[in-house]
Amino acid sequence: MGSKYSVMASLVDVLASLDFETVLDAFSGSGVVAYALKAMGKAVTANDFLTFSATIARATIENSSEQLDSADVARIMGPNADGRDFISRTFRGLYFDAGDLAFLDSAWSHIAHMTGSRRDLALASLCLAAAWKQPRGVFTVTSLRYDDGRRQLRTPLRTLFVEAVKDYNATVFDSGRDHHALCQDIADIPRADFDAVYLDPPYAPPRDDCDYIKRYHFLEGLSVYWQDRPIRYDTMTRKLEKRFTPFAYPRTIREALRSTFDQFRDSTIIFSYSSNAVPDATELMALLKSAKTHVQMIEVPHRYSFGTHAAAQRRQVREYIFVGE
Ligand SMILES: C[S@@+](CC[C@H](N)C(=O)[O-])C[C@H]1O[C@@H](n2cnc3c(N)ncnc32)[C@H](O)[C@@H]1O
């Protein structure tokens, strides 16, 4: 959800037109933008307040050399080393069958003894395998019977894990620069010396909220084996407590944006937002202008509507990229 994957080409064009060396991707999510920045030769700091996102960023952006080898994979796929069964007990009948849940427990019994980038790669791969096997990749649906036709929904998690390791191993490269991955609330990041800051916060919907924990609680728990992540047992989905962020609510988004723009007023700001969220483009422009002198806006069609009539055209979601210099 919210991944920039589908608008990467336009975003890379914008980023390539700007002059900077050091950059913060302040809301890194899947890590796809921070990774593109690494590939563009920039010195990247990726940040996200969710641990599973920060783990992906450590594995793919901070890490420049380590890969999982076949001995690592064989060990993780081996029998449960300590008999742990928290996942099997807690999520029985939810999301995955008993064999898949037992695999997550036994994989963790080995990953618990790993350190550094290899541990990050193993956890990123476990999370990716779990997301692949979940309808639309989100953990709001608990049914074992949902089938959208994807091969992954019928593939054992252990097989998907091996595929995910191959994919994540393939992302590892040395760009010749140092990169960092942080796991902090954006408000706590010091106004450090970044030439540029990329901001892709949650998009506050006009009604409701944009809560990432509601959709990704299982991946967040899996990335730490639910250590210090209390489960709400009153929920069918066994989700975690919400992680408050002012960006997720129409009531608090304006002040959150204003103070974030101010926090990074000494850097070039590249800011992504969507037309189906609040505030609107005019207000966003005014907010960014309160911190930056020169502001421009680029509009990118995000999802194409198949309708041809005018109303359908108007409903098209547009992605805005603002640049403040
Ligand atoms: C729109 S997504 C970013 C998507 C990312 N650019 C990508 O392409 O995958 C927003 C991200 O902001 C993170 N987030 C929300 N509030 C935050 C906060 N206050 N501090 C840091 N990260 C936050 C969420 O965990 C989520 O991963």
Image: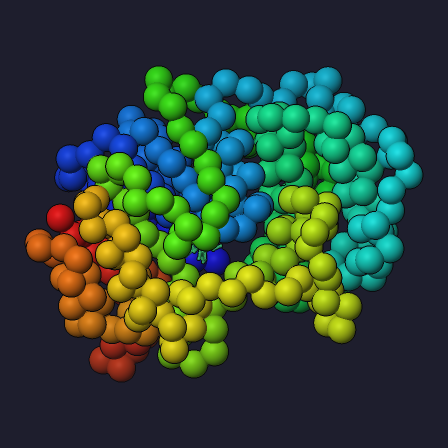
x then y, percent, for residue 168: 55, 31
- Res. 301 image quadrant: bottom left
x then y, percent, for residue 52: 57, 45
For image coordinates 41% across by 19% down, the residue present is: 174
Callout count: 0
**For this view, does 188 lie left or right of residue 219?**
left
As drawn, 234 above or below 34: below
- Name the residue furthest left: 294
- Res. 261 image quadrant: bottom left
Residue 202 at least partly seen = yes
x then y, percent, for residue 298: 17, 57
Q: How is the image coloured?
A: rainbow
For image coordinates 16% across by 52% down, the residue present is: 324
As drawn, 228 above or below 121: below
x then y, percent, for residue 119: 64, 30
Viewer-nearest residue: 226 or 133: 226
As drawn, 211 above or below 262: below
**For this view, does 208 lie left or right of residue 126?**
left
For image coordinates 69% across by 19% down, the residue present is: 70
For image coordinates 62% across by 51% down, the residue present is: 220
As drawn, 57 above or below 245: above
Residue 76 at least partly seen = no
Q: Quadrant of ligand 1?
A: bottom left
**For this view, does 142 lie left or right of residue 178?**
right
**For this view, does 301 lie left or right of residue 161?**
left
